[in-house]
Image: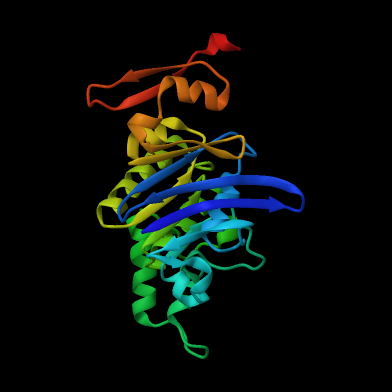
Amino acid sequence: MIEVKNISFKYTDELILSNISFSIKKGDILAILGENGSGKSTLLKLILSFFKPLDGEVLIDNKNVHLYNKKSLAKKIAYVPQSSNLPFSYTVLEVVLMSRISYQSIFSTYSSKDKNIAIEALRHLEIEFLKDRFFCDLSGGQKQLVLIARALAQKAEILIMDEPSSSLDYSNELMLLSQIKKLSKKGFTIIQTTHNPNHAFLISSKTLLLKDKKVFAFGHSNEVLTQKNINSLYNIKVELQESSEKIKFCIPKLDRY
């Protein structure tokens, strides 16, 4: 469904990514891990067609992302940024409804179907009670959940999330991970950046590690997220433990510091 082929990218004269290649299928959850500055967010923007690569290409359903028009691509991919500061006082419902623009003609207004889809997206994340609140008045965690609801209401097949749990408290973080896993079972393909290897262990089918501008490792999460790879990726010492459900967890060794 998504194939990244030999992507390289520069900001002015600085090489950010070099010869990046991987592919994922419908229903996969891909976690992208790497240190700050490793190019995680840039890679997402290349997949989203925000940037054009220096070399290589991104294919969605065997078609280059830059050959889609904006509305067609919006029906394929929805984006959840790390944060959003809207310049005007929109209600939560209005923010979620913005995702329905790709389904409208130039002079049309939101239909009752659009409003029902927006409400259902809020309900899915258990934040329907926020629908009449102003977005600018919400906490950071609440704003992030609204942005995810907006992506769900877009009804795209692919969700791209840039550190979606970074502003969430522990309870909402676990709820979000659970919702992401449910979405993949419904056929959504999800790519998320994260700094927490445990997120990949818990829900991701595939993991991509970025280091020194290149693919350090890619494959099934349990095969890629080894103790050696995690230690090398972050230059730290961790131990891996396995729960009774056969799920691995990454435990940092604090005496490293």
Q: Is 240 displayed left or right of 234 in the figure? A: left
Q: Is 128 displayed left or right of 161 in the figure? A: left
Q: Quadrant of the N terminus?
A: bottom left
Q: How is the image coloured?
A: rainbow
Residue depicted at x 52% and y 75%: 70
Q: Is residue 150 visible?
A: no
Outermost residue, left direction? 245
Residue 200's place in the image compared with 248, above or below, is: below
Q: Is residue 243 visible?
A: yes
Residue 89's spot in the image, x, y percent?
61, 67
Residue depicted at x 54% and y 27%: 233
Residue 79's spot in the image, x, y percent?
49, 59
Front in this rendered view, residue 148 or 35: 35
Outermost residue, right direction? 13
Count of marks placed on residues: 0
Residue depicted at x 25% and y 56%: 186
Outermost residue, bottom direction? 107
Residue 155's place in the image compared with 194, above or below, is: below
Residue 50's spot in the image, x, y percent?
59, 63
Kindly indicate the quadrant of the structure image that contains residue 87: bottom right
Residue 161's place in the image compared with 170, above or below, is: below
Q: Quadrant of the C terminus?
A: top right
